[in-house]
Each structure stands twice: as structure tokens, then as C-alpha cells.
């Protein structure tokens, strides 16, 4: 939401020594986040890249009727070449606004260097219409007095100042009665060096007041908005040397407190606008440079504060923090007690807590005054017409949305507010047909639907140029209902955003009165058709909360006195009464009571922020020295990660927790018994987010294959969760509600050379050893349920009786599905880390170092192609009846059909013989060797 | 006999002198003084000599032996010195060569920083907790004071899991924050409680360079007697100063989160410009770091905490954001890309 500083100063006196950035910081520290501070100059927004250029020469482009090419001096060493059409009357020496390519104008026009009919153009000469200064026609501003290259905004501001030429700031020196007229005064003013005498009817003139004086030759506005020239005149026999201006005469919004015929109190206006007081004689344009500061507030930081969605609420915050008085909301409308009135029937009081309506006649729809448009533009809203602008203005001022209907649309001056029927159709303003539900409320006239309550109007509900009578409607809709309706139909609007926050029905009244005031004031000739219809079934009772100041101090970490706390709360307009020592009774005003402040803690927050969080000293809490609770799985995860990466050379990846149908197909899971184990995401954003992973491997393997394009070998691992749907053991028909979430380690080797399975097997064995997992056994898997695993190259890892991992070649079909390239092979393991972490590895006792030397013997066994290493080592151990073997290492595998025969392989083992008691002798070694040879041969293998 | 001895001596001395390497010198030494050396053989023959000759010849032999051993030692140390001098003079290395190639793997930056965070909090007595990533609406929202109609549910666009709702738990969701673990831990361990919860969270939003549907958070919760916001400031200042390795300032400002009251946003002094004001902190000197506040009474109730005795604060910060901030990573998607060119930098 955008906040105009000018607007805020309508309600609270903000000291001018506080800079805009300091104000933004203050608001951020006390209330809500200010994301940006913007300084604006009306009309000139977005024109910062335009410069003044002087036409040096120009000529017609050959072959074109209309186009000319000109050399323009823009204050650089080289002139710019620009093409322009015939809409402009151009002369050498003219100085005009030039847009330098590339740039984009606020009208959306993009300017780029390009060739037209083979001629280069490097910018554009800008019409007022192209700059957005005027809506219609064809016109251009010339700047005869500006240097080429001058920034356009500066030059333009200068010409505007010339427009206010001869209107100056003056100080009233004396006020005396006109000798010949009761209602006129003779006023003596100082305009700097000179003193002037002026006849004036203003009733608020006092000595010392700063006023705007139009000197003879100046142009001011009359009541019809037409300029006329001020001349020296004689009024009832007294000479008058100029005119003292009211706000509307110089096109300013009315700020001066109005009583009778009122003159613009410049001192007051300058203060309100946070402008410095200027000495008499200063040109008015300079004194009132039409500018503003806009604070952009992060909407997310005010979702919980219904009162902050308008300037008045924000001004209240400033008033509280600056210790200033907030201007009361008081509106005086002369509303007749009888006449034509609006009939309202609220069919269900759940729909709205208040509903106000009135008929206003004599409307002339047209543009709203400039000052009002300026405010809307400052807040990022586009002016439409006076009625619409006023409703928007009131919404931005008080935070309460409202709506004006063309009376002819309503037809019968009746509102029937009801819930929709299921499937009831309405075409909304945006030309979309929408089907309503039983929970959406409609505004109807009893016959026809006029709009979706609080969210969006119906198709023809807008005010048009032909509108002459309106029905102003302001309602306080049920916030939850509005929120649901707006969500259900995807209709986000400024109104819905505010209504859903829970508005205060008292503000429904303020918004109504303010809109009535502005409409009758701005639309000259408009008047109320009759009395107000005010449906207000239940006036809310304001809650009272008991506040324990000790608790507040304890939670914030302060030692504030009861008195300080009271003053903080009062500053924010809470009504505070001391109940007893340490206990305050706080009445919550309506604008904070609807949703925001409900409990004591809410008030504690008010105290904390009013006090200022920055004043809070960092405190070091004293707590008993206690070792944190143990989290074995976490601790082991850290060890596991460093073994996998720093130890074994795997890189750690983190991949998404979901995948989609595509991965299911690629990994052959579709139709497998594992498919049913997946949880499905109900509202994925894309089709790769539909299935919660039951294995880390699909996403990890895909990442590895992407990497393998530029790497011969890729080793990746991930530690993360998998999510399995499991059946409830008790009720076999039902699944457990929560998934089985387990932490897994997935490891992958993707390589273009060597045997990834063997490599990964070694890595896994080392890993398990370093993790001190006891009783490891890795065995061929009897069968495979996961089709992405190679059924033959698949092993299971056991620690005692607990299966903790599987290790396998990736099914080549999967590799083909992933376009891995035929030379690329992959092996993977999936280790259930949750299970591993729960295995007690017991205590470890070191083995003493051998005291006697050992003897090594190498044995090569010629076995079948499918002979397992474990079979051979078992046979070797079987031969060792005396228990001399200390260790058996498999050291080499050799395959060679010519040398060894078909389907044969040679396995070489290095056997270490050692005794803890003595040095072994050669004979013992030879004996054992013989026994091993015999045992090997007995098994049908041969010793090589 | 003596002349033979003299000749042996002269030959040996000459051989020692002519030996140009330690190996050759050793060889010459073995020739004369080794187990089967010439002098050794002569000395062994003394035993067979007549008693009268024995003593004199024995003395002569020993004298020669002694002289030869001395000569050997001198020559040996000369050769060793020459060798060392040679090594010192001739050895040349190329320090610009890459050296032998080692390729240990790399831990993901997120897990590295997570471990660091865990260590720091652990040293302040915080236990590390885990909780499910697929949560129930009850734990993810209701128990955290976010009822179904609450606008805060908008701020946390949620992935829902296709499964029938449970009457108590509601639907299953991918947790949108680590906060549900607050409730689970309070219910399980009661008060006092000092925990942090690092973990993966999910938001149903489109991915671009700054937004991800999957990221990591760290939740913190401290419940004890008389715990205040000032204590939070103290703990966070301590934590951040250790994490960034320099004095860090923190700033509180109002913030709204349904599960805390009062609620605050915590900013840290800009890590890039050290609070002087720069492009990254939009010239404010501050960077948004986390949301926090005093645990809402409804949340304490959901966690079965005795409110008459205990109060506390909770916080949650984006671990992913912290990592990006620390290493200047400008595209969040790199973190889940599994691209080793990225991972290998950490």
C-alpha cells in the first residue's frame, strides 16, 4: 500500500525536521515495513530521461511525404539524428523535449534507435500527449530559455513556475473594515520589498497570516474552473492592487479550516505539506512545489491490522509515536430527514454488520479536481471520474471501501442483500460470467443481481458519463465470507482485501459521511435525495482487557512503570484505567477490536512497539547448565556425510522430494507394486511434483547423468527423507494416516569406464566399517521388487538380522530411458539411515599389536565364472584347522578365455598367517598350504 | 707377516680413498674388515699361532684394524657430507606443478552451514529436533493458531497430499515451515525446553531465481521461566556473531506471525557493507533475517505447557537464504540442481 505524506499531514502534525527516510524508518520500527520511499513530482513521473534538445537543421526524407530528419543538439559533443513527422511545426532553433533511445515513456511508448526508410533515428521529439502531460490534441512545449541537454523535468518545473507568475506569497500587515462595504476588508500586505493594499472579503484574515496574492497580470481560476486575469481595480471607491486567493482559485485542495468566505492560509498549508515557511515575495509556485513523498508499505506486514489500510489509521500510528494529536473525524452533512430513501433488506445478519445508503441527486460526472487526482496517483490509483475517484479516495483515506451505484441501475431504490443460490450466475465488471455458491452474498434490487457483496460489482454497475443520480452504499461485510468468496472466485480487489481484514462498523459510518461530504462539495449542484438508511443490527460492545504490567515487563524484558505503560497505550488511543497496582484495565477501541487486539499478549505487543524495540538491550539469559538431549540420527548423519564426501570422494546433492509420472515411467515404476506406495500431491504446480519420492535414486540419478555429459565419472550422494504409504497392521483395510518417513542415504556412481558396482561395493563396505556398523554381511538379493534395479546385479546389506541397504546396477532399460548414452553405466545404493542409526554398534576394544612376525602366502584359485569370493574364502578357512589364518585378502581377479578356459576365472588371495604366541615356522606354513590346496581341489576348483 | 699386514693396510687405505660413493666405500670395507674380509681372516688365524708370536701379532693386527676403521669413518663422513651437499645443490622442484591429484568429495553448502548452526546452538544448550516433512493440517496450522479461514494460510501456499482427511488431524500437507515441531516437541518433552529444528519445508509457488518450492529453515524455541524478548536479542546476537565471525548487530521491528505475540521481524546488520548502507541492504544497513516472537498462548496450550509458570520465544529463519547471503549465490535453483560444478566450489 502506498502512503502519501501530504495526506498523512492532513491528520497529524509531523515535524518538518523529520526527514522522509527517518519517518520511513520510524514506521518500520514501530508499525509496519516500509519497502521504499519515493519522491514524486506530479505529472512528471517517469520523464526523468527526457532532455531539452535544440533543432540545428532538418530536411525531408526522400521518398516520404511526411517524415523529416533533424540534427538535434542535446548538449553532447555530437548532435543526435532524429526523425519526426509532419504533426509538428518545426523551425531551426526551437528547443523541444527529446527522448533519448533507448527509453520507455510513462505512456508505455518504447523508444529505440532504429532505421526508418534507411535513415537512422536515435530518439523522439515528444508531444505533450506522448509525455502524458495532456490527454488530447496535438501540442508541444517549447523551452526557449533552457540550455540544450537540460533535464526536461527541471525545465518544465521552471515553466510551471512561470505559469504561477505574478502570484506571490504575502504577509498580512493589517486588516481594516472597508469604509463603504460591510463584508469587505482593506488589507495591507507585504510582498517582500513592497507593500500593497488590497480589498478582500475573506473572513479569516488576521494580521501576520501568510496568504497568496495574485498581482495584476496574474491568472487565477473562477468557480467554473476558467482562468481570468487579475487587473488593478477600484472596489467601492477604494483601489485594490491584486487579489488574495482562496484555495480553489489557485487549484489547490482545501486545507484551511473553513468558516464563511475563507482565504487560503498559506502558513497552515505549508506546514501541512511539510514545506518550509517562505518569506513574503516568494513566487507561489516555488513555495508550493507540487510534490509529495510516498511510502510504500509491505502489505504482508499489515495483514493483521484492519485499521492500517488507510491514511487515517497510519496517521494515528504517527500521532502515537510522535506524541502528537490526531485530528478527529468530524463530518457535517446537512442530510434531510425526509424525502426519497433507499429501502434495504438484509436477509441474514451474518452477511453484514452494518449497511448504509443514501440517494444523491444533481450529479454531473466529470473529472475530479487536480488535488484529488494527485492523491490517487500518488497512491498508485488511476483517476476515473469524480464519483469513482471520491469512493476510492475515501477508501484510501479511511481504509473502508464503498460503492456508488447509478440510481437508474438499481431502478427501485431497493437493496435486497442475500446469500446466492447454488449455481446462480452473475456477470461481473470484468465481463466474466461466474457461478455463485450458497456461501457468496449478493447485492440485488430484489429482481436483479447488482454485484457480489464486497468483492466486485455486476456488469453494468459502473458510474457513467450519463449518471445524474447515484445511490451511495457503504457496508461492513462479514470478513470471513468476503475472504472465502474472493478466494473461491479468484477475485482479488482493493475492496475485498480490506473487507476481509474485519473492518470496524463505526468506520462504515465515517466512510459514508466523508463520501457524502466530498460528493456534495466537489460535484457542484449535487444534493441529498432524502434521509440515510442505516441498518446496524448489532452495535458491537468494546472489549476490556486486564493487563498485568509485571507480565508485560517480564515478556518484553523491560522495567517500565505503570505510568509509562499507560502513556504508551493512551498514545495509541486505548482507553486505560488503573485497576490496582500492577493491573490496568484497557478498553479496546473499535478500530482495533474487530480482530487485532483480543488478549493481554496483544496489548503487550502494543507496549513493546510503542516503547521501541531498538531500546531493548540484548540480555543473556541464565539457564541451568545442561547438555542437550541426544539426537543420535542427527549426529551420525554428520559423520556419515563427512565419510561419504571427504573420505570416499562423493559429492553431496540435495534433490527435490517429489517427482512425476515421467520419472515413474523412466524408472519402470508404473504398474509395479511400488507404485501404490507413493503419496500423491493434490495441487502440484507442475507435473514433476505429483509423487512424493519413495526412493532418493530417481532424482539423484538424473542429476548424476546430467553431470556425466562432461565428466567421465560422477559420484553423488544425498541424505534425505523418503515417504512410504504403509498399511495399518490392526485395520488391514486402512492405511496409516502419517507416512513412514525414513532418512536414507542414496549413493550413485555413473561412469564411462570400469565397473561401478565393484567401486560402489568397496565404498559402501568402507563406509559401513567407518560407521562401525556391526556384523555386516552383503549377499546377493534373492529377488527384486524395484524394477529399476538390475535383477541379477543386486545385493542386500545386512547388519546382523537387520537389512539396512541395497546395492545394485541400475537396470539398463532405465539408463536407456534416461538417454544416458550406451557407454555410461550406473550403480547405486540405498541405505536406510534411520535403521542404521538405531543399530547399537556396542563398545569397541582395541586389539594388541602382534608380537611375532607373520607369514604371507598367495593362493590363486581357478574357479567358475559365478564362483563367489565368499565361497572360496570359506573353503580356505575350512582348511585352517589349527587357526593360523589371521586374515585373507582378495587381491586379484583374472579372466582370460585362452589361458584359463571358457567360463573360468582366477582369484588370487593373500593369506596372512600369524600367531599371538610364537613365530611360525616354515613347516607350519607348508602344511597349511597343502591343506588349502587339497580343500580347493576337493571343491572342484584348481590351484594355479 | 707384518709386511703382509702392511700391504693389506695400504691396499685398503687406497681402496677407501678411491671409493667415490658410500656404497663403494662400504664394499671396500667389507673386503678387508667384513665377516669374510682379508684382515678378519688373518686375525682368525692368530688362534693357531704359537704363544710367543700371538701377542705381538695380535697387537699389530688390532692396530691396523683400528687405523683402518678410523680411516673408513673419516672417508665415510666425507662422502656423506659430499652427498648431502650434492643433494642440497642439485635438488630442484617445480612448485607451480599441480602436485599429485586428490579428489575428496564436497558437502553441500546447505548441510555445511546447517551443521555449523547446529553446533553453535548445541553449545548454548539447545537440543536438535526433527519432525515429519509430511505434516497434518493440525500441526502445521491449527495448533499454531492458524485456523482454516486465517489469511496467514495465504502467505504459506500449501501443497496438499491426496488422502482422506483425519477427523482430528485434518488433511496431510507438505509442511510449510518447521514450526509444527514446536508443538510436537512441547507435547513430547514439556517445559523447560530449548530446541532448534533444522529442516526441509515446502511452499506451493512457482520457481525462479529467487523463489523455490523447496527450501530449508531453522526453527528455534526456548521455553522457561521469565523468558523475554531481550533474551532473544541476546541469544541471536551471540549466535550470529559466532556464525559470521564478527560482531553482529540485530534489530527488532514489529512483525506478524499468528503463532507468536508479540511478533517481531529480526534484521541483522548488513553482511556485505557492515551496516554502512549498500545496494544489497537498499542503503538501510539492515538485512531481513527472520521472524520471531513470544510463543502465543494458544500455541503453548496446544503444547500442554503450564502458562502460569512458563513462557518463551520462538524463531524461524531461512537456512537457504542464509547460505545464499553468505556465499553471494544469486540463483536459488543452483542449490537443488545437483550440478557438481556448483557443489565442488564448497
Image: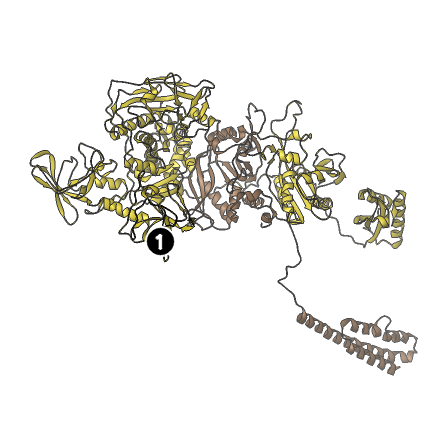
Chain colours: A yellow, B brown
Instruction: Using the rendered image of the protein, determine whether residue A211 is visible from the camera's viewpoint.
Output: no
* Image coordinates for residue A850, horizontal then vertical, percent: 78, 52
**From the viewer's perspective, is residue A263 above or below residue B326?**
above
- Tell me if B9 is positioned left or right of A200 in this view: right
**Residue at 71 percent of width and 49 percent of height:** A753
Q: Give the side of residue A249 with respect to residue B262, left or right.
A: left
- In this view, the residue farthest toward the bottom is B3
Q: In terms of image quadrants, where is residue A127?
A: top left
Picture quadrant where residue B228 is located: top left
- Could one spot residue A892 in this view of the protein? yes
Chain letter of mark 1 equals A
Q: Position of residue A419 (x, y in %)?
A: 42, 19
Q: Nearer the viewer, residue A21 or A613?
A: A21
Q: Is residue A263 above or below residue A519?
A: below
- Residue A857 in percent (x, y) is at 84, 52
The quadrant holding residue A224 is top left
Disc 1 crowd rating (10 Å Cα; few below 14, some 14-19, many 20+) is: many
Can you say whether A621 is above or below B8 in the image? above
Q: Nearer the viewer, residue A89 or B207?
A: A89
What is the x, y in percent for residue B128? 57, 39
The N terminus of chain B lies in which quarter of the figure?
Answer: bottom right
- Kindly identify which residue carries mark 1: A71
Look at the numbered disc 1 and give the secondary structure of its residue.
Answer: strand
Amino acid at each position: 500500500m502506498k502512503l502519501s505524506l501530504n495526506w498523512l499531514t492532513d491528520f497529524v502534525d509531523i515535524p518538518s525536521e523529520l526527514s522522509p527516510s527517518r519517518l520511513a524508518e520510524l514506521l518500520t520500527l514501530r508499525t509496519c515495513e516500509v519497502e521504499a520511499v519515493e519522491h514524486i513530482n506530479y505529472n512528471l513521473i517517469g520523464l526523468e530521461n527526457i532532455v531539452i534538445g535544440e533543432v540545428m537543421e532538418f530536411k525531408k526524407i526522400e521518398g516520404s511525404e511526411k517524415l523529416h530528419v533533424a540534427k538535434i543538439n542535446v548538449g553532447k559533443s555530437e548532435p543526435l539524428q532524429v526523425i519526426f513527422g509532419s504533426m509538428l511545426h518545426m523551425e531551426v532553433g526551437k528547443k523541444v523535449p527529446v527522448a533519448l533511445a533507448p527509453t520507455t515513456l510513462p505512456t508505455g511508448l518504447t523508444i529505440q534507435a532504429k532505421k526508418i526508410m534507411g535513415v537512422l533515428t536515435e530518439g523522439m521529439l515528444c508531444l505533450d500527449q506522448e509525455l502524458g502531460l495532456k490527454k488530447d490534441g496535438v501540442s508541444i512545449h517549447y523551452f526557449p530559455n533552457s540550455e540544450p541537454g537540460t533535464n526536461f523535468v527541471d525545465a518544465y518545473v521552471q515553466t510551471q513556475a512561470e505559469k504561477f507568475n505574478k502570484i506571490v506569497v504575502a504577509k498580512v500587515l493589517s486588516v481594516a473594515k472597508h469604509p463603504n462595504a460591510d463584508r469587505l476588508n482593506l488589507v495591507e500586505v507585504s510582498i517582500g520589498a513592497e507593500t500593497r493594499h488590497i480589498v478582500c472579503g475573506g473572513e479569516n484574515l488576521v494580521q501576520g497570516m501568510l496568504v497568496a496574492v495574485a498581482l495584476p497580470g496574474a491568472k487565477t481560476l473562477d468557480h467554473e474552473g476558467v482562468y481570468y486575469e487579475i487587473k488593478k481595480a477600484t472596489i467601492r471607491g477604494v483601489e485594490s492592487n491584486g487579489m488574495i486567493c482562496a484555495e480553489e482559485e489557485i487549484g489547490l485542495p482545501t486545507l484551511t479550516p473553513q468558516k464563511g468566505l475563507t482565504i487560503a492560509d498559506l502558513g497552515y498549508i505549508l506546514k501541512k505539506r511539510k514545506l518550509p515557511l517562505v518569506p513574503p515575495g516568494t513566487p507561489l509556485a516555488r513555495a508550493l512545489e507540487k510534490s509529495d513523498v510516498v511510502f510504500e508499505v509491505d502489505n504482508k506486514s499489515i495483514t493483521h491490522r484492519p485499521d492500517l489500510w488507510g491514511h487515517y489509521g497510519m496517521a494515528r500510528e504517527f500521532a502515537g509515536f510522535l506524541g502528537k494529536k490526531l485530528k478527529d473525524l468530524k463530518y457535517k452533512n446537512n442530510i434531510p430527514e425526509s424525502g426519497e430513501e433507499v429501502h434495504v433488506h438484509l436477509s441474514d445478519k451474518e452477511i453484514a454488520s452494518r449497511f448504509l445508503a443514501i440517494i444523491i441527486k444533481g450529479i454531473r460526472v466529470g473529472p475530479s479536481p487536480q488535488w484529488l487526482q494527485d492523491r490517487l496517483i500518488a497512491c498508485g490509483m488511476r483517476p476515473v471520474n469524480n464519483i469513482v475517484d471520491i469512493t476510492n479516495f475515501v477508501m484510501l483515506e479511511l481504509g473502508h471501501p464503498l460503492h456508488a451505484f447509478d440510481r437508474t441501475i438499481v431502478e427501485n431504490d431497493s437493496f435486497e442483500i442475500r446469500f446466492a443460490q447454488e449455481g446462480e450466475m452473475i456477470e461481473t465488471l470484468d465481463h466474466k460470467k461466474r457461478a455463485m455458491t450458497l456461501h457468496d452474498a449478493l447485492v440485488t434490487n430484489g429482481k436483479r443481481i447488482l454485484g457480489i457483496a464486497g468483492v466486485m460489482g455486476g456488469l453494468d454497475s459502473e458510474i457513467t458519463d450519463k449518471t445524474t443520480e447515484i445511490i451511495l452504499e457503504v457496508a461492513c461485510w462479514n470478513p470471513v465470507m468476503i475472504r472465502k468468496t474472493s478466494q473461491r472466485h479468484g477475485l482479488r480487489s482493493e475492496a475485498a482485501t480490506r473487507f476481509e481484514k474485519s473492518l470496524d462498523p463505526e468506520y462504515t459510518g465515517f466512510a459514508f459521511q466523508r463520501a457524502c461530504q466530498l460528493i456534495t462539495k466537489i460535484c457542484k449542484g449535487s444534493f441529498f435525495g432524502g434521509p440515510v438508511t442505516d441498518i446496524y443490527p448489532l452495535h458491537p460492545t468494546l472489549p476490556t482487557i486486564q493487563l498485568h504490567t509485571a507480565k508485560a515487563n517480564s515478556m518484553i524484558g523491560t522495567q517500565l512503570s505503570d505510568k509509562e505503560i499507560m502513556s504508551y497505550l493512551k498514545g495509541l488511543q486505548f482507553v486505560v484505567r488503573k485497576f490496582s497496582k500492577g493491573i490496568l484495565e484497557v478498553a479496546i477501541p473499535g478500530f482495533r477490536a474487530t480482530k487485532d487486539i483480543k488478549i493481554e499478549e496483544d496489548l503487550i505487543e502494543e507496549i513493546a512497539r510503542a516503547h521501541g524495540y531498538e531500546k531493548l538491550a540484548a540480555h543473556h539469559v541464565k539457564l541451568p547448565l545442561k547438555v542437550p538431549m541426544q539426537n543420535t540420527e542427527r549426529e551420525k548423519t554428520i559423520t556419515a556425510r563427512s565419510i561419504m564426501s571427504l573420505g570416499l570422494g562423493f559429492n553431496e546433492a540435495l534433490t527435490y522430494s517429489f517427482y512425476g509420472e515421467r520419472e515413474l515411467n523412466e524408472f519402470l515404476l508404473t504398474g509395479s507394486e511400488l507404485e501404490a506406495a507413493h503419496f500423491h500431491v493434490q495441487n502440484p504446480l507442475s507435473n514433476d511434483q505429483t509423487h512424493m519420492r519413495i526412493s532418493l535414486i530417481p532424482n539423484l540419478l538424473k542429476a548424476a547423468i546430467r553431470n556425466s555429459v562432461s565428466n567421465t565419472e560422477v559420484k553423488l550422494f544425498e541424505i534425505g527423507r523418503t515417504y512410504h504409504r504403509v498399511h495399518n497392521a490392526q485395520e488391514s483395510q486402512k492405511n496409516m494416516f502419517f507416512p513412514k518417513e525414513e532418512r536414507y542415504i542414496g549413493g550413485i556412481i555413473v561412469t564411462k569406464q570400469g565397473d561401478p558396482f565393484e567401486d560402489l561395493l568397496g565404498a559402501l563396505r568402507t563406509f559401513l566399517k567407518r560407521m562401525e556398523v556391526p556384523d555386516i554381511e552383503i549377499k546377493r538379493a534373492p529377488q527384486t521388487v524395484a524394477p529399476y534395479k538390475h535383477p541379477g546385479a543386486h545385493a542386500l546389506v545386512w547388519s546382523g538380522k537387520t537389512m539396512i541397504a541395497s546395492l545394485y546396477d541400475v537396470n539398463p532399460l532405465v539408463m536407456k530411458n534416461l538417454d544416458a548414452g550406451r557407454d555410461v553405466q550406473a550403480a547405486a545404493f540405498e541405505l536406510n539411515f534411520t535403521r542404521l542409526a538405531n543399530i547399537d554398534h556396542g563398545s569397541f576394544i582395541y586389539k594388541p599389536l602382534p608380537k611375532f612376525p607373520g607369514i604371507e602366502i598367495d593362493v590363486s584359485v581357478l574357479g567358475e565364472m559365478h564362483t563367489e569370493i565368499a565361497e572360496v574364502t570359506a573353503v580356505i578357512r575350512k582348511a585352517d584347522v589349527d587357526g593360523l589364518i589371521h586374515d585373507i585378502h582378495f587381491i586379484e581377479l583374472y579372466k582370460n578365455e585362452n589361458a584359463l578356459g571358457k567360463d573360468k576365472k582366477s582369484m588370487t588371495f593373500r593369506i596372512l598367517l600369524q600367531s599371538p604366541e610364537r613365530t611360525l615356522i616354515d613347516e607350519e606354513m607348508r602344511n597349511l598350504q597343502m591343506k588349502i590346496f587339497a580343500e580347493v581341489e576337493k571343491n572342484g576348483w584348481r590351484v594355479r | 707377516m707384518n709386511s703382509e699386514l702392511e700391504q693389506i693396510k695400504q691396499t685398503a687405505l687406497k681402496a677407501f680413498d678411491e671409493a667415490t660413493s658410500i656404497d663403494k666405500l662400504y664394499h671396500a670395507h667389507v673386503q678387508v674388515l667384513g665377516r669374510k674380509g682379508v684382515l678378519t681372516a688373518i686375525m682368525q688365524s692368530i688362534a693357531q699361532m704359537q704363544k710367543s708370536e700371538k701377542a705381538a701379532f695380535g697387537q699389530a693386527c688390532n692396530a691396523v684394524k683400528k687405523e683402518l676403521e678410523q680411516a673408513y669413518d673419516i672417508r665415510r663422513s666425507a662422502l656423506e657430507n659430499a652427498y648431502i651437499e650434492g643433494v642440497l645443490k642439485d635438488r630442484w622442484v617445480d612448485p607451480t606443478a599441480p602436485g599429485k591429484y586428490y579428489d575428496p568429495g564436497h558437502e553441500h553448502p546447505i548441510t555445511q552451514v546447517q551443521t555449523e548452526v547446529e553446533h553453535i546452538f548445541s553449545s548454548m544448550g539447545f537440543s536438535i529436533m526433527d519432525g515429519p516433512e509430511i505434516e497434518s493440517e493440525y500441526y502445521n496450522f491449527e495448533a499454531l493458531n492458524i485456523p482454516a479461514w486465517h489469511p496467514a494460510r495465504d502467505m504459506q501456499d500449501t501443497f496438499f497430499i491426496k488422502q482422506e482427511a483425519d477427523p482430528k488431524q485434518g488433511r496431510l500437507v507438505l509442511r510449510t515451515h518447521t514450526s509444527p515441531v514446536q508443538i510436537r516437541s512441547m507435547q513430547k518433552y514439556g517445559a523447560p525446553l530449548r530446541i532448534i529444528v533444522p529442516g526441509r519445508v515446502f511452499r506451493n509457488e512457482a520457481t525462479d531465481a529467487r523463489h523455490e518450492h523447496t527450501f530449508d529453515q531453522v526453527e528455534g524455541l526456548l521455553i522457561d521461566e521469565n523468558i523475554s524478548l531481550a533474551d532473544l536479542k541476546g541469544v541471536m546476537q551471540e549466535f550470529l556473531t559466532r556464525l559470521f565471525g564478527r560482531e553482529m548487530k540485530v534489530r527488532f521491528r514489529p512483525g506478524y506471525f499468528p503463532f507468536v505475540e508479540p511478533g517481531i521481524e529480526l534484521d541483522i546488520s548488513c553482511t556485505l557493507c557492515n551496516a554502512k548502507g549498500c545496494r544489497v541492504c537498499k542503503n538501510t544497513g539492515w538485512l531481513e533475517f527472520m521472524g520471531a516472537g513470544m510463543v502465543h498462548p494458544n500455541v503453548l496450550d496446544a503444547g500442554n505447557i503450564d502458562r502460569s509458570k512458563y513462557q518463551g520465544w520462538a524463531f524461524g529463519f531461512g537456512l537457504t537464504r542464509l547460505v545464499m547471503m553468505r556465499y553471494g549465490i544469486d540463483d536459488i535453483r543452483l542449490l537443488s540442481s545437483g550440478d557438481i560444478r556448483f557443489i565442488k566450489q564448497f
